[in-house]
């Protein structure tokens, strides 16, 4: 027996209400976790900016070096320029391609800083470097900066994992699709092996 039109409308209304009710169970968790991940990304950006600011002091530290050592410094400065030219705002976090470009630029700067770390580790070969009073302070600042980057990336990735899981898990997935049109966020992956490990900047004084 065919249901009457009013009956079908009533059933559809019940289904819609039930769906919205289930969606409401996760309606607040979706934006809350999204904003949490965005806040963690702001911490990542701040950590990378801190490192970029420190790079501007490298010229003073390496001015006693020559030849190949100066080319290392030049590479660091050029890598910094590229890294700071690529910015990711909160709206870009759903774009894996933009995240990959940002990661690549930051990894190149990390690699350059590793080369600079090797220069500092051989500081006894450069008496002029050894006499620079800010050497130890800058060395410590760079090490601390790299550690903060690692921690902020770890925290961001955890927030992204939490958010991405939420928008795929019932019943929050209904709120994510019906109410917000949510998309997964891109996590931060090391582009090269060991890129997530701070360069060893320990010198021999």
Image (tube, grey):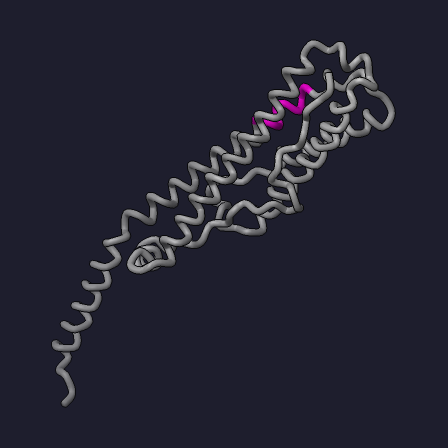
Residue at (54% x, 40% y) in the render: 88
Residue 178 locus on image (x, y percent): 31, 59
**Spot occupied by residue 177 in the image (x, y as percentages of width and height):** 35, 59
What span is colored magenta in the figure?
50-57
* Left-right relation of 171 to 37: left
User: What residue sits 77% from the left and 15% below the top?
Assistant: 129
Q: Is residue 53 magenta?
A: yes
**With respect to residue 69, does 16 lie above or below?**
below
- The quadrant in which the N terminus is found is bottom left
**Quarter in which the C terminus is drawn:** top right
For residue 28, above or below residue 75? below
* Residue drawn at the location 31% of the way across and 60% of the way down: 170
**In magenta stretch: residue 74:** no
Left or right position of 67 against 204 = right
Which residue occupies 78% across, 29% down?
A: 72
Instruction: Find residue 158 and report its horizontal and vertical position in percent.
Output: 45, 44
Q: Up-down: is 97 above or below 82?
A: below
């Amino acid at each position: 027996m065919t249901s009457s039109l009013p009956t079908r409308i009533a059933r559809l209304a019940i289904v819609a209400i039930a769906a919205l009710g289930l969606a409401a169970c996760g309606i607040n968790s979706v934006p809350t976790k999204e904003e949490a991940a965005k806040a963690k990304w702001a911490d990542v950006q701040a950590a990378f900016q801190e490192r970029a600011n420190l790079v501007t002091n490298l010229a003073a530290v390496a001015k006693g070096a020559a030849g190949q050592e100066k080319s290392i410094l030049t590479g660091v400065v050029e890598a910094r320029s590229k890294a700071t030219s690529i910015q990711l705002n909160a709206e870009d976090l759903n774009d894996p391609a933009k995240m990959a470009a940002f990661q690549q630029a930051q990894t190149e700067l990390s690699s350059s800083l590793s080369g600079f770390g090797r220069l500092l580790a051989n500081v006894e070969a450069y008496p002029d470097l050894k006499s620079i009073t800010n050497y130890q302070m800058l060395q410590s600042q760079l090490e601390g900066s790299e550690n903060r980057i690692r921690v902020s990336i770890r925290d961001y990735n955890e927030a992204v994992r939490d958010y991405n899981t939420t928008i795929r898990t019932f019943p929050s997935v209904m709120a994510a699709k019906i109410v917000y049109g949510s998309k997964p966020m891109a996590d931060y992956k090391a582009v090269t092996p060991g890129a997530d490990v701070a360069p060893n900047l320990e010198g021999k004084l």
